[in-house]
Image (tube, rainbow, N blue to C red):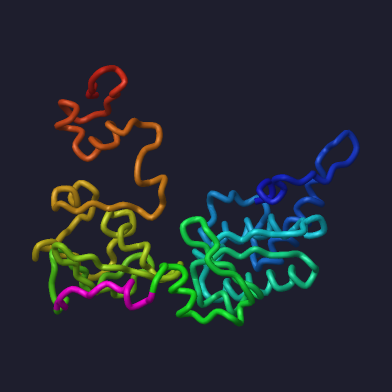
Amino acid sequence: MLENLRLGSDWNTGRGGRIRWGRERVAARTALASVGLNAHPDVLVGDLGAVQRTQVAVARALQDRGRARVLFFDEPTATLPGSEVERLFAVIRSTVEQGIGVVYISHRLEELPQIADRITVLRDGRVVGSGPMSEFRRDRLVEMIVGGSIQAAARTAGPARDGASGYLQFDEVYGGELNGASFAVAPGEIVGMAGLVGSGVHDIPAVLLGRVPLERGSIHVAGADLPDLSPHRLIARKIAVLPSARPLRAILTLTVRENLTLPDLGRSGGGVGFGCARSGGWRSS
């Protein structure tokens, strides 16, 4: 984290330009503590969770408040639980009290009355409204964002389903942060799931893939129990998983063709193995 905090800033150096690591670590601890993060400055950012990474980014922006005149926050609460959101807001208010302007970008309309003095609404790259926060009610904001009345933008809900069963069904599933999750997904149906970090919602695909052990409960596909969870078994049951972490959705060092055939290397490569499209055809190993 220490190196991340010093990006764009000068190091504290002594004779011969040597970095004074002791002083840097003390300064780093102070910066991290200002956003509520109690961690050793030498911890790798890659080993932190999404919440902690956001805190490091905020600490980096705030540690040079003596020189900054305006700070931009782009969706800083997207991965933060409620307690951390309040801590962030306190830090932002403290920054404003020091005469620093803050541009706070957010789609969470409920946050704006808590943090904003003025509001500007953009749609399709154009400013469609701007003024004091007190002049904007929630319904007016929504209409400005969608470009019409809320009633006109609303979609008619499809026929209700009893939810008792589906092609994919979780029954009292425990694993990771899941604590008795039960739901069903039917063919042709979209099931939306939402939850803060720590709610367990991100462990649903991890359990399906076998990355997080299934501790209790059962998972059924087309009415049959699905034991020994793994990507291979999911593919065989016609279930695809797109992880929330973008780097896990594809192997960036491979071509599009190679990524598309990863689920079925045996048929694509003439055997189990790895191929290279650039050579003019797949080579199995």
Q: Main secondary structure of the magenta part?
A: loop
Q: Which residues are magenta?
A: 149-161
Q: Please identify the residue farthest to the left as the structure is shown.
A: 223
> Is 14 rendered above or below residue 283?
below
Residue 235 x, y percent position in the rendering: 18, 48
Residue placed at 27% from the left, 72% from the top? 155
Q: Please identify the residue farthest to the top as the structure is shown.
A: 279
Residue placed at 80% from the left, 69% from the top? 98
Q: Is residue 112 magenta?
A: no
> Front-most of 94 and 179?
94
Residue 104 x, y percent position in the rendering: 61, 65
> Front-most of 79 and 22?
79
Q: Quadrant of residue 187?
A: bottom left
Q: Is residue 151 magenta?
A: yes
Residue placed at 15% from the left, 64% from the top? 220
Task: Say left or right for 180 vs 246.
Answer: left
